[in-house]
Image (cartoon, rainbow, N blue to C red):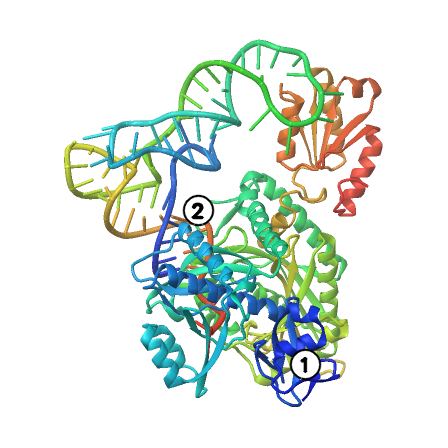
Amino acid sequence: MNIVLADGSQRVLDEGSSVLDAAKNISLGLAKKAVAGEVNGKAVDLGYILNEGDKVKIITESDAEGLEILRHSTAHLMAQAVQRIYPDVKVTIGPVIKDGFYYDFDTGEMKFTPDDLQKIEKEMAKIAAEKIEVHRKVLTKEEAKKVFNDMGENYKIELIDSIEDPTVSLYEQGDFMDLCRGPHMDNTSKIKHYKLLSVAGAYWRGDEKNPQLQRIYGTSWFKKDELDSYLNMLEEAKKRDHRKIGKELKLFMVEDEIGAGFPIYLPKGGILRAVLEEYERQEHLKRGYDIVYGPAILKSDMWKRSGHYDNYGENMYFTKIDDVEFGIKPMNCVNHIMVYKSDLRSYRDLPLKLFELGTVHRHEKSGVLHGLMRVRAFTQDDAHVFCTPEQLNGEIVKIIDFVTDVMNVFGFEFEIEVSTKPEKYIGSDDNWEKATEALFEALKIKGLPYEINEGDGAFYGPKIDIKLKDAIGRFWQCATIQADFNLPERFDLTYIGEDGQKHRPIMLHRVILGSVDRFIGVLTEHFAGSFPVWIAPVQVKVMNITDDSLARCKEVEAALRAEGFRVQGDYRNEKINLKIREAQLEKIPHMIILGKNEVENGTITVRLRDGSNKNNLDLSDYISVLRGLDINKSLELWR
RNA sequence: GCUGGUGUAGCUCAAUCGGUAGAGCAACUGACUUGUAAUCAGUAGGUUGUGGGUUCAAUUCCUAUCACCAGCUCCA
């Protein structure tokens, strides 16, 4: 029997060979790492019997599909353990998710506790040690329903009813049987490195009218060090939580007396934000943007015309002035459109790029609020580019370059997604197609890889979403670029072309940092509060050892402040150890420590946040180092 | 918005069965003048998120409400 491998080469196998046999035939090492197979494009178990001419690919531990199969099998293992401990519990569904899996159980009155998780984990280890083989069975729907009916698993019967095929597959491992498409690991002993993480309530099929189920989340990996590093990452994420660091470093607060989702910036967070915003202004001016400002509330008629009233109204706040309804802006585009309309525009004026650090309000559901990451009032580094059709691709490319430049400054890598037409939208399909095509075209020009996110665009246009990757590998949605042919039509925007006729401009909506608030949250977690010199709220702290050096300290402090640096003095009657400890906890980049020696020599000593020391420096030399770090936006503590 | 959990001093957390709230740090006062991550002593600090109820008595039990945390979107 001949089979064809992924690289196009052929192999001769005995009749009745399985996928695993094929793997063995290629190499024993491959067979050892094999998890499942892909035959003629379909994922199958290792035990799948091959036929003449099959195209075979071996899925191994290093493939993404392999990891998914492991996690799915771990979900089954967990369900088996749960049913051994709690025979009355009914199983429902247990899919793979990012970094792990979950399984939903109908536990009746019983609720899982964290102690139960440990018990279940132990039982899982026991089942794995039993080295139970996993078998696939194909039954007709009627047969399968009978099997689950006998087991009392009514949820499975409901699932079978929603399957279209005449037959379904079941996976059996010892005393446990589950409806599943597969493929699966062929033996429970291959599941070694897993951890159950949390319990949560969830509804059957996500519908609150259905019974409430108990969901257990877990993670699973092929290697112990992979599991360990994932668990470490979770720990690290907890330590870096911007809500925790924000409180410790006194950056911001969310006060329930003021309102949920409305953050307040404390002085330390305030200066940090001001530095970021000033950087933004400079970068936009450099790239030919104009700075504009608009009001926070606009007459509802404007929102009706823009389509926000119908398509975004649930997320908006409204108020009344002298019996006229006004809407609080959830986006800045309408104001910028009015700026465009304030004058007659010629093709010579285009592209017109309007930038605003615009504060918007959106009604987010109470359950989704989260520190600075998800709020009800936030400021966007928002701009709208009005251009001709000929300029469109070039302008999108320029924005991608802008995003790249800014991300590099912070040391972020990023990934790109294109979101297409959603269910609720305005404008013609023709316009949507043109707009979407323009985004793809620009990405092609830049040669950037991207994924497609169907139906996730804004109601007025498709978008390029840029997700940045932080220091511990998490992704955050920040920058976005949206092509819009629709609002220019609704507001009848025009420019006079070379031909003397009126033409319709195209509008690009874009943000770079996205929400400045959210970006500050991301930066806080990315740097774990240890901000680079150029954005640190306090760049330098000057501290005296005894009162003998107090005068010199004040002199140094004043000199740094006069140079425009953010400097603070700590001249309390305390030991230097305490002052250093506190400055260290505040994550201040530089400490200048002055005692008798420095006063005598006329030099300064700088302790860096990393614990190292720079001795016998001239103040003027230090100032030039600090200036270099500051204006170059260096991520280093010294140069 | 829904489900579950949580809410005690500025911060981090205690308080048995319902018996009237306590510690560390911070703050304040005093002493100590100190060389690279916490000097010592003392003082003060609370309508236990908020409203209502049960009780002789409520941080504790019930109820409403607000806020926070996790999840609810990934569907064999």
Figure quadrant of the N terminus of chain A? bottom right
Residue type indicated by callout 2:
Ile
Q: Is residue A422 visible?
A: yes
Dot 2 or dot 1, earlier in sequence: 2
Q: Quadrant of residue A317?
A: bottom left
The correct choice, above or below, for A64 with respect to A594 in the image is below
> x and y percent of residue A207 in the render?
37, 69
Residue shown at 74%/67% (left/top)? A398
Mark identifier at residue A503: 1
Figure quadrant of the C terminus of chain A? top right
Tell me the SS state at disc 1: strand
Q: Residue furthest front?
A: A14
The correct choice, above or below, for A612 with respect to B31 in the image is below
**Label 2 close to label 1 by CB (< 8 Å):** no
Q: Quadrant of residue A332?
A: bottom right
Which residue in the protein does label 2 denote? A258
